[in-house]
Amino acid sequence: MRIIDLRSDTVTVPTKEMRLAMAEAEVGDDVYGEDPTVNRLQEVAAELVGKEAALFLPSGTMANQVAILTHTERGQEVILDEESHIYYYEVGSPAMLGGVQLKPVAGLLSERGPEVLRQAFRPPDIHFPPTSLVCLENTFNRGGGVVISQGIMKEIYELAKDRNLTVHLDGARIFNASVAAGCNVREFTRFCDSVMFSLSKGLGAPVGSILAGSRDFIERAKRYRKALGGGWRQAGILAAAGLVALQNISRLAEDHANARRLAEELVGLPQLLVDLSKVQTNIVVVEVKGQWTAAEFAQKLYFKGVRCSVMGPNTVRFVTHKDVSREDIELVISIVKQIFVP
């Protein structure tokens, strides 16, 4: 039985083009800065998001933590959304690695974001840790893949600058945001001092993320990457796949269309609740009502060849990606309806 895997866009496999590029990649020792394919990837990535320089890292989590370490000092505070990936899914790394306190607030990644940030600021006081950094996320994973608008990002960025704070953007799916908004990705990345984006989610590379910012920031970030064990050697084999992945940005619109198709069919089922206003990119969050828990619903889907993620007691998540076709989506719709209406 073929499995239709909608747990995440991280489950994609490399394309034939990626595998060929990996096999033929020119390589060198990247710790010495001598891998030409890594260097090319970093140059292309920096130019793409409008930053001076970029750094290739094994994962988005490492890239986010390197950014926090580079932007902050021990004993400082970082303001971020209470549902953000950095706070929710990154193992408490800022405290563990950097001695940095996170201040999670509700609603930062929403239309209320600027006002939420204003309320989060505290006056100077010897009892309070000084705030040095604001972290944003776009698209917002636990928010259902919604796009944080350029206007909201701009307001938050300007508020941070008024207090001499820096802004880091967890842009793991920032290209989903730009495709959904119909604009150049720089319209988002201009409102942050550093940005991380994933090559291994919707873009389909097997591994890797990019951290971009000023030249000085990236030079300092290299030391933290090395300290965390992220010093690559002949990493051009992986960077080659990343370069191919960066050619796939426009294809993300197909994933968005498939997610919308799935959501529009599921919303008609009385046993499920879907907020169509939040289905803006490639993520569909579904509330399971009544008869089963989310885990029970996911298990029933699994037995029929469909995988999804359990996000809470009554919440599941479907994520579309390049390895899921429109035909697959139609089959998933049929399977879900069969479960509820045998």
Image: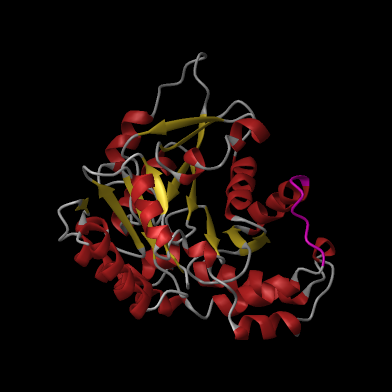
Residue located at (47% from left, 44% from top): 135
- Horizontally, residue 20 falls left or right of residue 75, namely right
Location of residue 290 by image quarter: top left
Q: Is residue 9 above or below residue 228?
A: below
Q: Position of residue 196 (x, y in %)?
A: 54, 57
Q: Camera-side residue: 279 or 186?
A: 279
Q: Residue furthest top?
A: 127
Q: Position of residue 189 (x, y in %)?
A: 45, 60
Q: Position of residue 200 (x, y in %)?
A: 56, 65
Task: Tell me if residue 241 is in the magenta stretch.
Answer: no
Q: Is residue 113 above or below residue 282?
A: above
Q: Is residue 264 above or below residue 292?
A: below
Q: Is residue 88 above or below residue 207?
A: above
Q: Camera-side residue: 66 or 270?
A: 270
Dominant secondary structure of the residues highlighted in magenta in the image: loop
Residue located at (42% from left, 32% from top): 104
Task: Tell me if residue 229 is in the magenta stretch.
Answer: yes
Q: Position of residue 273 (x, y in %)?
A: 20, 51
In which quadrant will I find the C terminus? bottom left
Q: Is residue 218 visible?
A: yes
Q: Camera-side residue: 30 or 176?
A: 176
Question: Which region is colored magenta?
Answer: 227-233
- Horizontally, residue 312 falls left or right of residue 30, namely left
